[in-house]
Image: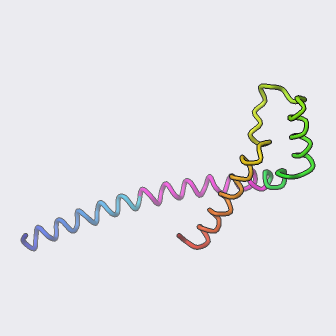
Amino acid sequence: MSDNKKQLARIRKMERRLNRASAAVKRLEAALDKWDDAQEAIAALNEYYGSDLWKQDLADDEVGRLPADLKRGVLSEDGIWNLLTNCRELTSRLKKGK
């Protein structure tokens, strides 16, 4: 391959890398904006989970005091626990920069 062909191939390869990296950075920036917006909700869920209010809501659900059509993922132990665990792992990952 001539020097000119190598040069053109290199530039094209680097251009593809630039485009891919630029798109990834834009997606990450948008995701981090959403993450920042969700921090208030995450903090409220963290405070609610395991609280006396949460325990009362769970107890009322278990004895049928809540409407059958009420979404109740927030009352499952796994739902909030998994979210909070994922949040801690993501926060740690962001701090490490990996």
Is residue 42 one of those drawn in magenta?
A: yes
Give left or right: position of 18 versus 50: left
Residue span colored magenta:
23-43
Q: In which quarter of the image is the N terminus?
A: bottom left
The foreground one among 92 and 68 is 68
Is residue 35 one of those drawn in magenta?
A: yes
Q: Is residue 3 above or below residue 79?
A: below
State the colouring used for the structure image: rainbow
Q: Which secondary structure dominates the residues rendered in magenta?
A: helix
Give left or right: position of 86 versus 71: left
Q: Which residue is drawn at 55% across and 71% down?
A: 97
The residue at the far front in this view is 63
Residue 10 pos. (x, y %): 21, 68
Give left or right: position of 7 versus 59: left
Q: Is residue 30 above or below residue 59?
A: below
Residue 47 pos. (x, y %): 84, 55
